[in-house]
Amino acid sequence: MNAAAPLFQADRLTLGLALPWVDAAEHAGRREVDFPRQLDLAAQAEAAGFAALWVRDVPLNHPGYPEAIGHLDPWTWLGALATRTRRIHLVTGAIVLTLRHPLHVAKGAVSVAALAPGRFVLGLGSGDRPPEYLAFGRNSATRREDFRARWEQLSAALDTPPRVVPDLHDDPPVAFSLRPRPATPVPMLAVGSAGQSLDWIARHAVGWTTYHRPPEVQRGRHAMWRQAVERAAPGQFRAFGVAMRVELLDRPDAPAEAIELGYRTGVRALAGILARMREAGTHHVSLNLPAGARPLPDIIDELAPLNAGLA
């Protein structure tokens, strides 16, 4: 098996795809996603040169959440993807750390890292749906402090060597271990801010991924990120990533039109947008392909040349 190149690299932009990809018929009929077919699409994305597949953590559905489809448990889904693919990175976007125990997250992370050596990136967030906090008996008002505390406990468990920090201590203390031990450290990525300062994120995470915003706004956010990296992690590389919605039209020369969190565009205009993002210092873009009339295999094939062009 060929070792995967790092997902985040200075002076380079890589592309990922968010899972699952939902057909218009599935979305309109509110049917469950055909996940075996999703595995076929994931293999096609890998063959097309995409750098990453992004998996979401959606514990529960409720009427206030606009996406009615069901999501698999991320760890189960990542295990299936790890055994179906060989080179493409697998990224969580994002595990809701404030609703999951850090030691459970650590166990899932080292398990996926063992199935997909060098290919797993642990994206973490605090969630943004207060009803889920109520369902799990958590207080959304303390999610900022909870996120920091759980990050520290998780980071210790994933450290080299791992350090398991129990919630409560026995007397004498019990020396727990976490296995399997990954061959390389599991990268921890901040997805969204989780209520933390950019300095905190730059100090603790391998990078920061945020939603797409208009270029003039994103330039300012990127400048703030670079300044935070210079203050909190001088001389170290920290990635900047963007999650972007793309409605790819079947007319390659169609101009780009701004939509919420992204663009409605032809593939040539999209190539120009991505090239400008690379020049501005973006290291990775996760494409969210919404339900549309075009077959998904066709869209993946049409996007494939962009991967070579951005390398």
Image: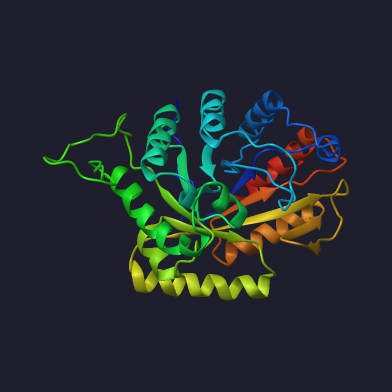
Q: Quadrant of residue 197?
A: bottom left
- Does residue 73 sit above or below 250 in this rendering? above
Residue 4 in sight in this render? yes
Please identify the quadrant where the N terminus is shown. top left
Residue sitting at 20 percent across and 45 percent down? 169
Residue 98 position within the rendered picture, expressed as x and y whole percent measured from the top left: 47, 52
Using residue 241 as the reference point, say whether residue 226 is left or right of it. left
Residue sitting at 49 percent across and 46 percent down? 7
Residue 129 in sight in this render? no
Residue 125 position within the rendered picture, expressed as x and y whole percent measured from the top left: 51, 54
- Does residue 261 sit above or below 54 in this rendering? below
- Does residue 99 sit above or below 78 in this rendering? below
Q: How many dots with numbers?
A: 0
Question: 19 or 279: nearer the eye?
Answer: 19
Residue 283 position within the rendered picture, expressed as x and y whole percent measured from the top left: 53, 56
Residue 271 position within the rendered picture, expressed as x and y whole percent measured from the top left: 71, 55
Residue sitting at 50 percent across and 61 percent down? 194
Using residue 241 as the reference point, say whether residue 170 is left or right of it. left
In this picture the colour scheme is rainbow
Q: Residue furthest left?
A: 172
Q: Quadrant of residue 68?
A: top right
Question: 169 or 196: nearer the eye?
Answer: 169
